[in-house]
Amino acid sequence: MHVAEDGPEHQNSDPVPPVLGEEHRVALDLIPWETRSADDLDASAAGPPQFEMWMRTPPVDADLAPALTAYATDLALIGTALRPLEGFNQCGNGTAFTSAVTSHTLWFHRPFRTDQWLLLRQHSPVLAHGRCFGRGDVRCDDGTLVAATPRRHSCVSTSDGRAQGNSFAYRTIIPI
């Protein structure tokens, strides 16, 4: 929605690791991307509230990059936010809990292609009082920042035991 114009530029340097090998392939049935990660969002062991995933699509028209990236950046925030909690992971979504996106913004900084490797690097600084917040960057394999995304999800405690014996679960909340 913005025509590229000439102007000053800068970008914070943030080292990007090499693209992970085939042994780190992750099957995400919800998106038609090839994805690789060293982290397992389905693990029940506690870890830091951060997640990195390399991703790329099969060859597609470059005009599809924003739409495909918007969809792909919405998939792993709940899993990222749950990582510090021993025994909780995104595997329980739909059975042990339900989740709802309440805000998903995506800013595009430069043109890019999704059929080249992109690094989604995200973290969740807070999960509290029924809300989860996370931020993410999308970078090309050379470190160029192409998009950034802040997101919020609803996260409400319940005591009905749906969280596999724990008292923490999610309910869908529609913001008004």
Image (cartoon, rainbow, N blue to C red):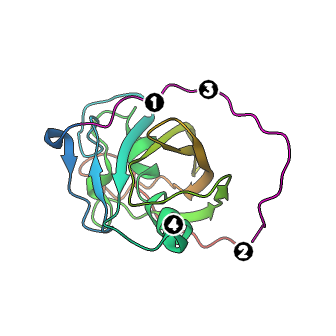
Element type where label 4 sits in the image: helix
Task: Point out the frontmost of discs 1 and 2.
Answer: 1
Q: CA distance from mark 4 to mark 3?
A: 23 Å
The residue type indicated by label 4 comes to Ala
Residue 126's x, y, as percent?
Answer: 58, 37
Residue 93's x, y, as percent?
Answer: 33, 61
Residue at image mark 1: 16
Q: CA distance from mark 1 to mark 3?
A: 9 Å
Residue 85 lies in magenta, yes or no? no
Task: For the N terminus, give its image quadrant.
Answer: bottom right
Q: Residue at x 25, y 48 (%)?
A: 165
Q: Which disc is residue 65 wearing?
A: 4
Mark 2, Cα crowd under 10 Å, few <14 / some 14-19 / many 20+, is: few
Residue 152's x, y, as percent?
Answer: 60, 55
Q: Which disc is residue 176 wearing?
A: 2
Q: Which residues are magenta?
A: 1-20
Of pointers 1 and 2, the one earlier in the residue sequence: 1
Q: Residue at x 48, y 36 (%)?
A: 142
- Residue 5 against residue 63 in the figure, above or below: above
Of pointers 2 and 3, the one earlier in the residue sequence: 3
Task: Point out the frontmost of discs 2 and 3.
Answer: 3
Q: Are marks 4 and 3 in contact (CB under 8 Å)?
A: no
Residue 16 lies in magenta, yes or no? yes
Element type where label 1 sits in the image: loop
The residue type indicated by label 3 comes to Ser
The front one of 167 and 133 is 133
The residue type indicated by label 1 comes to Val
Residue 131's x, y, as percent?
Answer: 59, 51
Q: CA distance from mark 4 to mark 2?
A: 30 Å
Residue at image mark 3: 13
The residue type indicated by label 2 comes to Ile
Mark 3, Cα crowd under 10 Å, few <14 / some 14-19 / many 20+, is: few
